[in-house]
Image: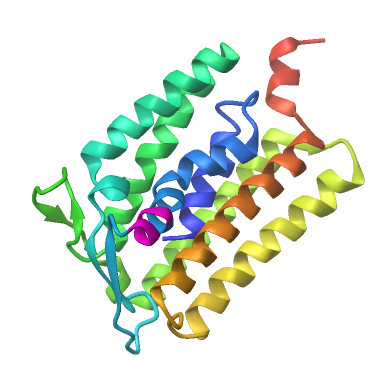
Amino acid sequence: MFLGHYAVALAAKRVAPKTSLGTLYFAAQLADMLWPVLLLLGWERVRIVGGPNPFLIFAFDSYPISHSLGTLVAWALLVGVLYRARTGYATGAVVLGACVLSHWVLDVVTHRPDLPIYPGGPVVGLGLWTSPAATVLVEGLMFVAGVSIYLMATHARTGGGRSGLWLLLAVLVLCYVAALVSGPPPSMPALASGGIVFGWLFVGWAAWVDRRRASTVAARAAGP
C-alpha cells in the first residue's frame, strides 16, 4: 500500500482543517517512515526475493516496532499527545492518531500474513497483493477519492498552491508506477535510503503546498 496511505492523509484534511497536510502525510506514513531507519539499524529485517508480482518482491521477516498493531497504537498515542501539547488542537491530535493506526489497517488488507498483532505475537494479512490488478484498482480509487476530498476541503491561495499540489500528486503516481515496472531495488540499504529520502520529501512538499492553500471547511465554519 502506497497511494492508499496518502489518500487517507488527503481525506483527513476535511476532518482536521487546521492540521498541515505535511503532518497528516507524516502520520499516515509513520510506519513506513520508521521502517527504513530500523532496517539500517538492523532492528528489523526484510529480504528482497523478486518475482513476477511487483507487490510480492519483499519478504518481511520482522518489523514489530514499525508495523505491529500494538506498537502503532503506542505511536498513535505519542503522536496525538505531542501534537495536542504543541498546538492545543484536540481534533487534529485525534485525527493524526487515527491516521497512524490506519496504516496498519490498510496493510492488513494488502499484505500476506506477516503483520504482527504485537511484537512476537500472531501475524495477519488478507493478501490483496496476490492480485496486482485488484491492488492497483483499490489504491487508485482510494487516491482519487482522497484527492477529491482534499480539493473540496481546500482552495489555492497562490499559484504554488495549485501547481505545486498537482505536481506533488503526479510525482506520487509516477513513483507508484515506477515501483511496479522497475523491479526490485539492488540492495536493502538502497531500499531503506530511498524510503527515507522520498518519505521526507513528500512530507515537506505537502507542508509547502498546504501553506499555500486555505481551508474551505474552516471558512464555512467561521461563517460570514
Instruction: Please state which of residues 109 and 172 is positioned toward the viewer in this rendering.
Output: 172
Q: Which residues are magenta?
A: 37-41
The quarter of the picture where residue 79 lies is top left
- Left or right, 198 with respect to 126, comes to right
Residue 84 in picture, x, y percent from top left: 50, 16
> Could you tell me which residue is drawn at 46 percent across and 80 percent down?
185
Residue positioned most to the right: 159
Residue 96 in picture, x, y percent from top left: 47, 30
> Could you tell me which residue is drawn at 80 percent across and 52 percent down?
164
Q: Is residue 167 above or below residue 92?
A: below
Q: Quadrant of the N terminus?
A: bottom left
> Could you tell me which residue is drawn at 35 percent across and 60 percent down?
39
- Left or right, 133 with respect to 60, comes to right
Q: Main secondary structure of the magenta part?
A: helix
Q: Quadrant of the C terminus?
A: top right
Does the stretch in magenta take in 40?
A: yes
Residue 87 in picture, x, y percent from top left: 59, 15
> Could you tell me which residue is drawn at 52 percent across and 85 percent down?
182
Q: Is residue 51 above or below residue 194?
A: below
Q: How is the image coloured?
A: rainbow
Residue 77 in picture, x, y percent from top left: 35, 25
